[in-house]
């Protein structure tokens, strides 16, 4: 008779426990134990409990390969879900085997868990483990299916609503409560104040901040005070919510005929436009993707979108200022070039048109496409193609947490027919679909890899570009961590090439996420450890730091709506006729539209309830010493980056915290 000690850990959540009967079967190289009920005096599987049991076997089982957990009815109690953290088995010889679970077990069923040592396919020589890997992936591919949501855009999980999503994908209770509670509170406040029901123009600019006076921050107060200033307009290209558009301009586009005479007043007498172009201090923001995008009607009125070109200059002081704005891609008498020397409200209106275009491009391409839809593709492919024992599953699963669920919520409330896009955003859902298609057609692997993107856009030497500075440090920290993990499990290029699970994962991301578009430069296969390291770094950076950079500042930079209008109610000006404040107010969104958009952006700001900052791994998927050492080093480097950011911010009038590691969530979860 051999007696094994079994320790079972239940999750901490208030609903994590169960009254169901839990039994266990141990499967070793030399056989398996009889099914044994885990039952001691008292309540066994309560939230946060860690209980130990003795499991007998007629003979020694040898090294334990896997366990089976059987969840069955108990007496007259109704079935209840159980969140199992881990199971630890100690053999009579003192050998310890760990079996991570970290998921809800729902219904009466049997769940198999493999021993925690990470293994690529070639490491699993025992036929039982090989069989387990195949069966697990078959089950996962049946559970997680793809569907095409909008033709020409990344595919998504085949889930119709948040209520029907598999329980392990859904928000935890604290996160769901905070998410929906905050949204309801924002809508009720704007309704109580009378703004949500008023489809009318704002009477004064000073009324706009009254919608959410209690939600203001130092950044939002700064926006209210400085939104009309050219220096703040330029600053947002570097450190706002869309810091990925600006690029160096060494030669003016043919469709943007800016002359020296136009910009001489802004540049000053000591230089010229040609000299600044050669010096590398001229930058361009091009919104060509918005050309010919259809628009919708809001409050019964047609809305408008522009596709501007904006020329910017970084002064010796480091300030980035706009030099010239053209509100279309087609120059001509009806598409004048607006300048800082124009009358105040005309120049302000031109900049506001650019900011509105920024809203459209940011929300659809920089945010929805790059941060959310790709995160979902990475998540679904990980669930379908990598078994739990795979080292890359263990590496990636913390960075996919809630990513599918937040996208299901978006498809339910934001981008569905009749959702927020149709009710408050100029493009509506049809325009969003077209812009998503165009965005994916132009998305490249270079764009997704921050060091390559910085080089390709020519912005390596721009001063005060904190998104770049902080982002490159975080990219390097992730890359070092990932390189260490890859080095442990892939000793040769052949081990990368022959890992059929890895190659299936990469291939599925390529076909479902990038629709097999070779021109994207996104790999469909990986051949070396270096290629794998770069690819994994891109995935983790996209799901964590990049999402934080384009998400966290939305509300506080938009709470004063003229800085970030979701729509424009009149077409772009076709001449330089004088503009009054009333005409400006009659162009930007109405009270109810503003209230709805700000309510949504308030919900989508970073959520600190049940947040897991970058590098935080409370679930022990890796149990080996090597990966744990790498995790600790990763956390130390992130702490060092945090200190560097804190020190830098002390000297800034406006702190940049969107890439501050404690504010970055491990995954695209909001």
Image (cartoon, rainbow, N blue to C red):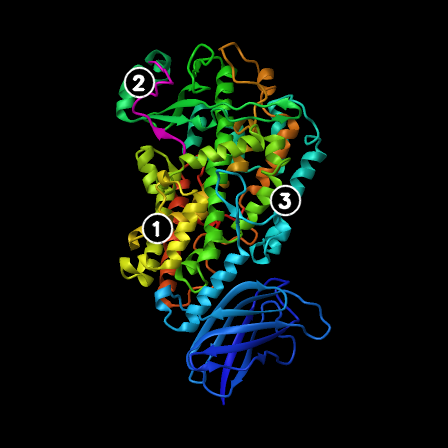
Q: Which secondary structure class fits the magenta region best?
A: loop
Q: Is residue 34 left or right of residue 276?
A: right
Q: Is residue 462 left or right of residue 574?
A: left
Q: Residues within 10 Å of mark 1 (few under 14, many from 20)?
A: some
Q: Is residue 253 magenta?
A: yes
Which comes sooner in the sequence, label 3 or label 1? 3
Of badges 3 and 1, the one in the foreground is 1
Q: Secondary structure at mark 1?
A: loop
Disc 1 target residue: 525
Whether residue 215 is situated above or below residue 177 in the rendered picture: above
Q: Which mark is residue 182?
A: 3
Q: As drawn, which residue projects farthest toward the right?
A: 76
Indicate the quadrant where residue 70 lies: bottom right
How far across and how far down the image is residue 427, in percent?
A: 55, 29
Which residues fall within the magenta stretch? 244-259
Q: Residues within 10 Å of mark 2 (few under 14, many from 20)?
A: many
The answer to whether the residues at label 1 and label 2 have Cβ atoms under 8 Å apart is no
Q: Secondary structure at mark 3?
A: helix
Disc 2 target residue: 273
């Amino acid at each position: 008779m051999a007696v094994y000690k079994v320790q079972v850990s239940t999750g901490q959540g208030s609903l994590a426990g169960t009254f169901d009967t839990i039994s266990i079967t141990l499967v070793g190289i030399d056989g398996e134990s009889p099914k044994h009920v885990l039952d001691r005096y008292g309540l066994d599987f309560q939230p946060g409990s860690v209980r130990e049991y003795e499991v007998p076997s007629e003979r020694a089982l040898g090294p334990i390969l896997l366990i089976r957990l059987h969840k069955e009815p108990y007496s007259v109690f109704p079935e209840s879900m159980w969140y199992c953290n881990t199971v630890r088995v100690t053999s009579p010889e003192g050998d310890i085997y760990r079996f991570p679970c970290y998921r809800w077990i729902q219904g009466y069923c049997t769940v198999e868990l493999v021993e925690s040592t990470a293994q690529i396919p070639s490491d699993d020589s025992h036929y039982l483990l090989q069989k387990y890997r195949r069966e697990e992936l078959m089950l996962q591919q049946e559970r997680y299916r793809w569907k095409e949501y909008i033709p020409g855009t990344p595919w998504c999980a085949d889930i119709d609503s948040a209520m029907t999503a598999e329980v392990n994908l859904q928000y935890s209770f604290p996160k769901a409560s905070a998410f929906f509670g905050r949204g309801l509170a924002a809508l009720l406040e704007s309704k109580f104040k009378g703004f949500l029901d008023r489809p009318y123009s704002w009477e004064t600019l000073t009324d706009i901040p009254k919608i959410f006076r209690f939600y203001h921050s130092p950044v939002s107060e700064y926006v209210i005070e400085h939104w009309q200033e050219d220096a703040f307009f330029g600053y947002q290209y570097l450190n706002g919510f869309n810091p990925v558009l600006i690029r160096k301009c060494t030669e003016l586009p043919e469709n943007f005929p800016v002359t020296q005479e136009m910009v001489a007043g802004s540049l000053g007498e000591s230089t010229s436009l040609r000299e600044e172009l050669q010096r590398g201090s001229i930058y361009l923001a091009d919104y060509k993707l918005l050309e010919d995008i259809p628009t919708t009607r809001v409050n019964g009125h047609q809305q408008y979108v522009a596709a501007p070109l904006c020329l910017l200059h970084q002064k010796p002081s480091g300030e980035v200022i706009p030099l010239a704005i053209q509100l279309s891609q087609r120059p001509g008498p009806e598409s004048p070039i607006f300048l800082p020397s124009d009358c105040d409200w005309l120049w302000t209106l031109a900049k506001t048109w650019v900011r509105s275009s920024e809203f459209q491009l940011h929300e659809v391409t920089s945010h929805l496409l790059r941060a959310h839809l790709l995160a979902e593709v990475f998540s679904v492919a990980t669930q379908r193609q990598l078994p739990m024992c795979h080292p890359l599953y263990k590496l990636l699963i913390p960075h996919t947490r809630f990513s599918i669920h937040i996208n299901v919520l978006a498809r339910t409330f934001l981008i569905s027919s009749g959702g927020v896009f149709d009710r408050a955003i100029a493009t509506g859902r049809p325009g969003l679909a077209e812009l998503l298609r165009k965005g994916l057609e132009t998305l490249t692997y270079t764009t997704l890899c921050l060091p390559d993107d910085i080089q390709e856009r020519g912005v390596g030497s721009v001063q005060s570009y904190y998104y770049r500075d902080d982002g490159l440090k975080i990219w390097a920290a992730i890359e070092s961590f990932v390189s260490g993990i890859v080095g442990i499990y892939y000793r040769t290029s052949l081990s990368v090439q022959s890992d059929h699970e890895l190659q299936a994962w990469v291939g599925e991301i390529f076909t479902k996420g990038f629709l097999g578009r070779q021109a994207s430069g996104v790999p469909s296969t990986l051949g070396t450890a270096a290629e794998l390291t770069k690819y994994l770094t891109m995935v983790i950076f996209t799901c964590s730091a990049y999402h934080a950079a384009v998400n966290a500042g939305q509300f506080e930079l938009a709470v004063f709506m003229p800085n970030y209008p979701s729509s424009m109610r009149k077409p772009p000006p076709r001449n330089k006729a004088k503009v009054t404040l009333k005409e400006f107010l009659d162009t930007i969104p109405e009270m109810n539209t503003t209230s709805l958009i700000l309510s949504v952006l308030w919900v989508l700001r970073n959520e600190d309830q049940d947040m897991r900052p970058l590098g935080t791994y409370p679930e022990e998927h890796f149990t080996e010493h090597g990966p744990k050492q790498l995790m600790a080093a990763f956390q130390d480097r992130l702490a060092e980056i945090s200190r560097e950011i804190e020190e830098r911010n002390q000297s800034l009038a406006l702190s940049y915290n969107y890439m501050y590691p404690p504010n970055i969530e491990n995954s695209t979860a909001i």
